Image (cartoon, helix red, strand yellow):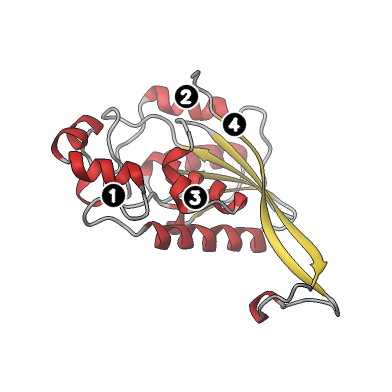
Amino acid sequence: MARLDLLRHGEPVGGPRYRGDGVDDPLTPEGLVAMWRAVEGGVWDIVISSPLQRCRTFAEAYAEKSGLPLVIEPRLREINLGVWEGLSHEEVQTHWAEAYAAYKRDIVTGMPYGSESVLAFMERVREALDELAARHAGQRVLVVCHAVVMRASLALALDAPPQVLNRIRVDYAAMLRLRHVVETLPSHPPVDSAERSNETPGMVVRSRWAFEGLINPSPL
């Protein structure tokens, strides 16, 4: 059983704006302090990080200070936001009003032009999480990543539709806790063959992620 603590990066330089994997501002001093505050008292076996500097800078510093191994996982980079990359929220709402309304109605069908598919994004996050579970069974893992990566991880744990991604609040330096669970369940009603690996007669083994908490450090 692996436990993942997903930590969002702190506030980046440049103020609020759309940052996917196409814009990578460094952290403000306050943003870095918030991340150090978020990990106070935590104990982990390994640090995993997005390759983007707003995550990697802290992950490298924390891993070095704590004497922990560090692994960079490209699949945990932020979702690409196409033509909105680097624009402020006000610029998007003013100059892309119709597209912004479509995005708010349904993030799956309303992503901006040139962006990454939400479904493809969720699949790469799912693959990364499942590999972490397999590689780090019995360990507690600190994962330094991004808001939409954390929203996708929570949606996957809850079996929620991808439309919830822009309805989950994840502040700077927020922490999401997940636990990998392996269950042995009766094999009826029938399941497809892809789910029957490692099953015993009349039983099926299923793995899933359990949600254990989301801590937003900022007040409402």
Q: Residues within 10 Å of mark 2 (few under 14, many from 20)?
A: some
Provide the residue designation for mark 1.
81
Q: CA distance from mark 1 to mark 3?
A: 15 Å
Q: Please state which of residues 97 and 44 is positioned toward the viewer in this rendering.
A: 97
| Residue occupying image coordinates x 68% and y 37% | 43
Q: Please state which of residues 164 and 141 is positioned toward the viewer in this rendering.
A: 164
Q: Residues within 10 Å of mark 1 (few under 14, many from 20)?
A: many
Percent x, y of residue 87 = 21, 38
Q: CA distance from mark 4 to mark 1?
A: 29 Å
| Residue occupying image coordinates x 42% and y 60% | 119
Left-right relation of 99 to 174: left
Quarter of the figure with residue 202: bottom right
Query: Is residue 108 shown to the viewer in this render?
Result: yes
Query: Depth-wise, is mark 4 or mark 1 nearer the camera?
Result: 1
Quarter of the figure with residue 23: top left
Q: CA distance from mark 2 to mark 1?
A: 27 Å
Q: CA distance from mark 3 to mark 2?
A: 26 Å
Query: Depth-wise, is mark 3 or mark 2 nearer the camera?
Result: 3
Say what amino acid the circle numbered 2 marks: Val
The answer to which of marks 3 and 2 sits earlier in the sequence is: 2
Left-right relation of 144 to 190: left
| Residue occupying image coordinates x 55% and y 25% | 37
Provide the residue designation for mark 2.
33
Q: Point out which mark residue 152 bears.
A: 3
The answer to which of marks 4 and 3 sits earlier in the sequence is: 4
The answer to which of marks 1 and 3 sits earlier in the sequence is: 1
